[in-house]
Image (spheres, rainbow, N blue to C red):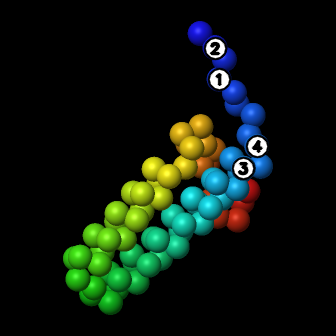
Amino acid sequence: MTAKNTTLTLEHIEDAELVAWMREQLARIKGFLIDHEANEEMISAIDQAIEDNENWSDPENHDFLNNTSSGSC
């Protein structure tokens, strides 16, 4: 069994920051759509974008990303 590399690179940090920022923006857009009674198709599209955003990041960033919010990196 090999040891897992736990060293974060600048690229890991930038990726995590981008995913966290996108998470925040998509949540704001979804809230706006709900507040303005958008149709289910539009809300579903944002839900898909949220899911895609969460799956985009490198799996090694998962723990780091879950402990990061936009602006705190």
Name the residue furthest bottom. 36
**The disc label shown at residue 11, or none:** 3
- Which structural element holds mark 1? loop
- Which structural element holds mark 3? helix
Q: Is residue 5 left or right of residue 37?
A: right
Tag 1 residue: 4
Q: Amino acid at mark 1?
A: Lys
Tags 4 and 3 touching, CB below 8 Å: yes
Quarter where residue 22 is shown: bottom right
* Front-most of residues 32 and 44: 44
- The answer, for residue 47, to whether it is visible in the render is yes
C-alpha separation, residue under disc 4 versus residue under disc 3: 5 Å
Tags 1 and 2 touching, CB below 8 Å: yes
In the displayed structure, would residue 18 be above or below residue 8? below
Tag 4 residue: 9
Q: Position of residue 59 (x, y in %)?
A: 54, 40
